[in-house]
Image: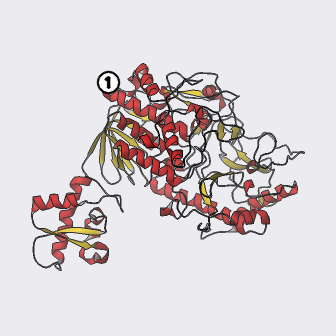
C-alpha cells in the first residue's frame, strides 16, 4: 500500500478506507481536522498525524447518530489509528536495506533492485541525492574516464535533459575546465528529479524523513534497524551510504574521527598540518581573467598574515570572532577534528531571485577578520571582486554554484561535533553554519569596508526561486566533507592514492587530488593560520584503485554490512576518495556485492572477488587504469 509523504509521511489512501469498510462495516465521513481540532484527541492519542489523507481530511468510521457526536469521532480516531498501526508500524522485510538517500544511496538501491532484490532505501531527510542534489553543482569528478557504471548513467541522463552529450573518453583540460560537456554543471532540482526517476523506475521502496534509532544484531549479523517512528526494517544485507557512517557506528563497527598523524601509516600530509613559518611574499602575482594567478592558485585562496586579536597586536585583548582557540601542536602529530563544512549555495542572477536575508542576530563585528583580509588584499593592489570570497561556477539558467574561499562558506570548528551529534543537534549546527554564511553575504553586500565593486557584485545575486522551495531557496543539505571513517583490515592511505601501492580487489577508481579543507583557524606565530588545510595533487599519479576490503568491516564485527562513504581510509587518503562520483561508484559495487552475498548465502567478507569483478565489469564499472573500453551508459530515452 502506498504511503503518501505529507507531514509525518504516514497517510492513508482510499484503499485503506475500503479495506476497513469491508472488515468493520458502517459508513465513512471525512472531516477537515485542521478546522475541527476540538473533535480529535490528538495530544492524548498521538495518532492524528498518521490518519490524515493527502487532501488534509481525516476519515472517521461512524456507526450511527449525528456527525456532531464527538464521542463517535473520538472512537473513530482510535479505529483509524489501529488500522494505521497495522500498515505503518508493521515490520518491513527486504533483501537489502540501504540507509542514507545520498547520491551513493540511490545508486546502491537502484543497483540492488536491478539485480532482482527487494530494496528499502531509508533517508533521514526529505530529499534524495545528498550533496549532488543539495547544492554541489560543480561536481568534483577528477578524471571523468575513471567514472563508469550507474554514476556514468546518472550524469549522462542528467545532461540529456539539456540536449547535451558527454565525452567520457576525454580528460579535463586546464584548471577544472570540463571536457564532459556540462556533466559537472548541475541545477539541483534537475539532479533530484533524475535520482527520483531512477529509484521509481527500479521499484525501490523509499522511506523519507525516517531516522535510525537503533540496530539489532545477532552475533556478527545485523538483524534489523529500528527507526524513530518505531518501524523495524529487516534485511539480509545492509549498506551504509550516509556521510557520517551512522549505521556503521550503531552496528558497533570500529571507526575513527582522528587525523591519524604521519607516523601511523608512514604518510606525509596526515595529522596536524600548517606552514611552518609564514613567509611574507615579495611578489604578489596578479590574477588573470579566470581568477587564477600564474601557477594556478585562485584568488579565493589568497592568504595573508592577519592579526588575530581584537586590538591588533595585543594578545590580552582576546581573539577575534572566527578565530579558534587552541595551540598549533606539532606538525604531523595525531589530532582530532574533521574538515570544515559549508553550504554549497546555488545563487541566481535572474530577475525573480529571492533576497538573501541576514540572520536575526547579525553583527558586522563578527566579520572583522574578513575586513582585515580585505585591507591586506587592497594593500598589495588587488582589484577585488566577489571571486575573492567564493569560487563560483556558472550553471544553466542564470545560476551559479558558490564554493568556499579563504573567507567563504566554511566555518572551521563548527563541524567537529557533527558526526557524533544527535539528529536534533545536527539541525542546530546546520543552522549555526547557515547563519554565519548568511551574515557573511550580508556583510559583503552592505558593509562600507567592503570595496564597492564587491558590494555591487554581491547584490547581483539572490536565492533561486525554483530551487529548494521548502527551505526558501537555501540548500537543504549541509556539505559533510568528512565524518566517521571505518577502520577495517584494509585501510587506504596516501600510499594508495599516490600510486606507491595498489589496493587489491578493485571495486572502482579515485582520481581527485588531495583536498583537505581547513580543520581549524588558529593563531601561530601571532598570525592567523588555516591549520589542517592541504590542497595539492598526488605526485602526478593517475587514477588509483579502491579495494573491496575498504568497504567491508572486519569479519568479527559485522558480516552483512557494507560502508561506501565512511569507508576505511586515512584522513588524507579520504580527502581524495570523498568525491561524489566516486561515492556513487563504491556504492554500486557495494550493492553488487550485497546481492552476491545473498545469492551465495555468505558473509560480505566471503564474496568471491572473481564473480564480483565479472559483474562489475559487465555493468560498466571502471576497475583498472588505463581503463578498458566499456559500453556507453543508457540514454534517458532508452529508460
> x and y percent of residue 217 in the render?
33, 37
> x and y percent of residue 138 in the render?
61, 47
Callout 1: 10 Å neighbours few (<14), some, many (20+)? Answer: few
Task: Work out whether 474 lies above or below 33.
Answer: above
Q: What is the total number of numbered labels drawn onto the structure image?
A: 1
Please indicate whether residue 43 sits to the left or right of residue 557 in the image.
left
> x and y percent of residue 140 in the render?
61, 42
Q: Quadrant of the C terminus?
A: top left
Along the line of sight, the residue nearer the viewer: 155 or 286: 155
Along the line of sight, the residue nearer the viewer: 374 or 18: 18
Whether residue 601 is visible, yes or no, is no
Whether residue 182 is visible, yes or no, is yes
Q: What element carries label 1?
A: helix
List the single residue furthest toward the right: 282
Q: Residue at x 44, y 40 (%)?
A: 107
Q: Mark 1 points at which residue?
A: 600
Please indicate whether residue 267 sits to the left or right of residue 3 in the image.
right
Q: Residue at x 28, y 61 (%)?
A: 50
List the single residue furthest toward the top: 610
Task: Work out whether 625 lies above or below 254.
Answer: above
User: In which quarter of the view is residue 462 placed?
Assistant: bottom right
Please indicate whether residue 213 sits to the left or right of residue 305 in the image.
left
Rendered image coloring scheme? secondary structure
Please indicate whether residue 639 sits to the left or right of residue 630 in the image.
left
Task: Work out whether 310 lies above or below 553.
Answer: below
> x and y percent of residue 613 in the render?
45, 23
Amino acid at each position: 500500500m502506498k504511503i503518501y509523504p505529507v507531514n509525518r509521511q504516514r497517510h492513508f489512501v482510499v484503499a485503506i478506507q475500503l479495506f476497513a469498510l469491508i472488515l468493520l462495516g458502517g459508513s465513512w465521513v471525512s472531516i477537515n481536522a485542521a478546522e475541527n481540532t476540538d473533535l480529535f484527541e490528538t495530544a492524548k492519542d498521538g495518532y492524528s498525524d498518521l490518519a490524515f489523507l493527502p487532501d488534509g481530511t481525516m476519515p472517521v468510521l461512524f456507526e450511527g447518530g449525528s456527525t456532531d457526536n464527538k464521542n463517535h469521532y473520538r472512537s473513530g480516531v482510535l479505529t483509524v489509528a489501529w488500522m494505521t498501526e497495522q500498515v505503518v508500524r508493521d515490520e518491513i522485510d527486504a533483501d537489502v536495506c540501504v540507509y542514507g538517500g545520498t547520491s551513493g544511496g540511490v545508486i546502491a538501491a537502484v543497483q540492488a533492485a536491478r539485480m532482482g532484490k527487494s530494496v528499502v532505501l531509508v533517508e533521514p531527510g526529505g530529499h534524495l541525492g545528498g550533496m549532488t542534489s543539495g547544492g554541489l553543482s560543480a561536481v568534483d569528478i577528477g578524471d571523468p574516464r575513471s567514472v563508469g557504471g550507474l554514476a556514468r548513467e546518472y550524469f549522462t541522463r542528467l545532461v540529456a535533459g539539456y540536449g547535451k552529450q558527454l565525452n567520457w573518453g576525454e580528460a579535463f583540460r586546464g584548471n577544472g575546465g570540463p571536457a564532459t560537456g556540462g556533466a559537472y554543471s548541475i541545477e539541483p532540482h534537475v539532479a533530484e528529479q533524475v535520482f527520483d526517476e531512477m529509484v521509481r523506475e527500479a521499484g525501490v521502496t523509499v522511506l523519507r524523513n525516517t531516522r535510525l534509532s537503533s540496530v539489532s544484531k545477532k552475533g556478527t549479523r545485523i538483524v534489523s534497524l529500528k527507526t524513530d517512528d518505531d518501524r523495524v526494517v529487516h534485511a539480509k544485507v545492509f549498506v551504509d551510504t550516509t556521510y557520517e557512517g551512522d549505521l556503521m557506528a550503531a552496528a558497533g563497527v570500529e571507526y575513527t574521527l582522528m587525523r591519524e598523524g604521519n607516523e601511523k601509516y608512514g604518510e606525509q600530509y596526515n595529522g596536524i598540518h600548517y606552514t611552518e613559518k609564514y613567509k611574507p611574499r615579495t611578489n604578489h602575482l596578479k590574477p588573470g581573467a579566470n581568477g587564477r594567478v600564474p601557477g594556478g592558485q585562485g584568488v579565493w585562496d589568497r592568504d595573508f598574515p592577519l592579526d588575530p586579536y581584537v586590538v591588533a597586536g595585543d594578545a590580552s585583548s582576546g581573539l577575534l570572532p572566527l578565530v579558534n582557540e587552541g595551540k598549533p601542536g606539532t606538525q604531523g602529530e595525531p589530532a582530532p577534528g574533521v574538515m570544515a563544512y559549508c553550504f554549497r549555495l546555488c545563487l541566481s542572477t535572474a530577475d525573480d531571485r529571492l533576497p538573501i536575508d541576514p540572520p536575526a542576530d547579525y553583527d558586522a563585528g563578527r566579520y572583522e577578520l574578513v575586513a582585515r583580509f580585505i585591507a591586506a588584499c587592497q594593500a598589495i593592489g588587488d582589484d577585488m571582486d566577489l571571486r575573492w570570497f567564493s569560487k563560483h561556477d556558472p550553471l544553466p539558467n542564470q545560476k551559479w554554484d558558490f564554493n568556499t574561499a579563504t573567507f567563504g562558506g566554511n566555518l572551521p570548528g563548527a563541524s567537529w561535533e557533527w558526526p557524533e551529534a544527535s539528529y536534533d543537534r545536527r539541525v542546530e549546527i546546520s543552522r549555526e553554519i547557515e547563519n554565519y554564511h548568511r551574515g557573511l553575504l550580508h556583510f559583503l553586500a552592505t558593509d562600507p569596508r567592503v570595496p564597492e565593486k564587491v558590494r555591487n557584485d554581491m547584490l547581483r545575486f539572490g536565492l533561486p526561486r525554483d530551487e529548494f522551495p521548502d527551505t526558501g531557496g537555501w540548500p537543504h543539505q549541509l556539505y559533510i566533507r568528512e565524518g566517521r571513517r571505518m577502520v577495517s583490515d584494509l585501510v587506504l592511505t596516501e600510499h594508495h592514492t599516490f600510486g606507491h601501492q595498489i589496493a587489491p580487489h578493485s571495486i572502482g577508481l579515485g582520481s581527485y587530488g588531495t583536498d583537505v579543507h581547513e580543520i581549524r583557524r588558529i593563531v601561530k606565530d601571532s598570525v592567523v593560520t588555516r591549520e589542517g588545510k592541504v590542497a595539492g595533487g598526488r605526485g602526478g599519479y593517475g587514477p588509483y584503485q579502491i579495494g573491496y576490503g575498504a568497504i567491508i568491516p572486519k569479519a568479527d564485527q559485522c558480516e552483512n554490512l557494507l560502508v561506501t562513504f565512511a569507508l576505511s581510509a586515512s584522513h588524507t587518503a579520504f580527502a581524495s576518495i570523498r568525491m561524489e562520483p566516486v561515492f556513487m561508484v563504491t556504492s554500486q559495487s557495494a550493492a553488487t556485492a550485497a546481492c552476491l552475498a545473498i545469492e551465495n548465502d555468505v558473509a560480505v567478507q566471503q564474496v568471491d572477488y572473481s564473480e564480483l569483478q565479472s559483474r562489475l565489469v559487465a555493468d560498466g564499472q571502471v576497475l583498472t587504469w588505463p581503463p578498458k573500453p566499456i559500453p556507453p551508459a543508457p540514454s534517458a530515452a532508452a529508460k
